Amino acid sequence: MQQRTQVIFAIGLLARVALLLWGEYQDRTMVVKYTDVDYDVYTDASREVVAGNSPFDRTTYRYTPLLAFILLPNVYVYEAWGKLLFVASDMVVAYVIYAILQLRAIPESTAINYTMVWLFHPFSINISTRGNADTLVVLLCMVSLYLLMKKQLVLSALIYGLAVHFKIYPIVYALAFLVFLDEDYDHALASRPVPSSLIGKALHWLNRHRLTFGLVSGGLFLALTGLFYAIYGYTFLFEGYLYHFSRTDNRHNFSMYFYDLYLRYGTSGGFMMGLIAFLPQFLTLFNISLRCGKDLIFAQFLLTVCFVVFNKVCTAQYFLWYSVYLPLVLPHSELSGKQLLAMIGLWFGGELHWLYWAFGLEIMGQNTFFNVWIAGLVFFVVNIGLMIAFNTHHHHAPLFAKGEVVGVSAKAAKTD
């Protein structure tokens, strides 16, 4: 690793440590706390475990029990243990991004330039230092991708199954993974004859890699689900998974469905509308998986953006989920620097417009529900436009060809 690369990683770490220290100071001296309210929920759940109770005895704890166990040192050792863990995870994410870029034959000096998109991304720094556990899920997704590129199929599947257990959203990658695992991933599969019958073709499509990945990842997910169901019962199933299907947030929600969910809040119509909202999301995800699955990294980027944008609930930390793929898709993008700056300006403009009206509603107590909804629609259109721009200017190519990783595009080689 070059000295410049080491210095950049060190600066990224120092920035996070500085914000951790600032957060401790702000929490002690100011009315508005730096620490994410979810961090207090995690810690309280760990206290319940220490007391011999269920982590779900803590109201609003809607995560895997594993998280409460991982954060037991918050109770036994140091309350900021979890923040240190999340910052460490954030830094490992950066290193895995860097490693994936090098697997694609990008020179080190160029790879670290793209890695800086994550290292100095305000969302990644802010979310990890405030104590949000989403960095763990993002790390699992990145490690699963890296292992798959290294042809460690079983390990990749195990990590992916764990990621879905931690947070349900990575399930949207499942079909894309299966599309990806074809004869380009393992060239030996290309020699298999294709049967003429429909059933034969279906069985031919279910090659050993697809079966292995599906059975291993799904098996681990079901095993963990079964284990915690046996321990905590239906409460675990509802709080950990089912709640998110019926969730109808009428605050802190960037979604275009916000206003309708607000008007129907607490009614059977609101629940049904929440379920109906999954239909366009599902159809779009299905289409992206089939069309882009062979270009797996770009498919995961589009799938995550689509899931977040079309979801009936959209909060700020969701933006982290697709931001992690930016350093990996930019090398194959034909967007110019000016175009990227304009897109960043549009995105932040849409977000700030929403925040302006949300501030009036949630802080000032003003009746700006309709304005927040309009701002959400504008933000939706902006995100769809940016997704189209990325897709239009992306150099579409399979991640693997003849069993090998496909190298970088010409554009990336010139950004050194």
Image (tube, rainbow, N blue to C red):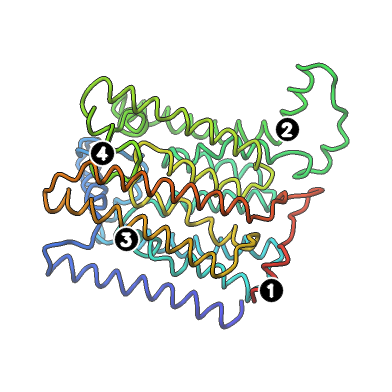
Q: What amino acid does circle 1 point to? A: Lys
Say few, some or many: other residues with alpha carbon within 10 Å of mark 2 (under 14 / 14 to 19 / 20 or more): few
Whole-angstrom CA distance, mark 3 to mark 4, is 19 Å
Helix, strand or loop at disc 1? loop
Q: What amino acid does circle 3 point to? A: Lys
Q: Mark 4 = which residue?
A: 55
Whole-angstrom CA distance, mark 1 to mark 2, is 39 Å
Indicate the quadrant where residue 155 lies.
top right
Which residue is farthest bottom?
3
Whole-angstrom CA distance, mark 4 to mark 2, is 39 Å
Front position among marks 1 and 4: 1
* 360 or 173, nearer to the observer: 360
Residue displayed at 88% across by 28% down: 193
Residue displayed at 26% across by 60% down: 77
Q: Mark 2 = which residue?
A: 208
Q: How many marks?
A: 4
Front position among marks 3 and 4: 3
* 239 or 331, nearer to the observer: 331
Whole-angstrom CA distance, mark 2 to mark 3, is 40 Å
Q: Position of residue 338 (x, y in %)?
A: 54, 69
Mark 4 or mark 3, which is nearer the start of the sequence? 4
Q: What amino acid does circle 4 point to? A: Pro
Mark 2 or mark 1, which is nearer the start of the sequence? 2
Q: Mark 3 = which residue?
A: 83
Q: Position of residue 277 (x, y in %)?
A: 40, 30
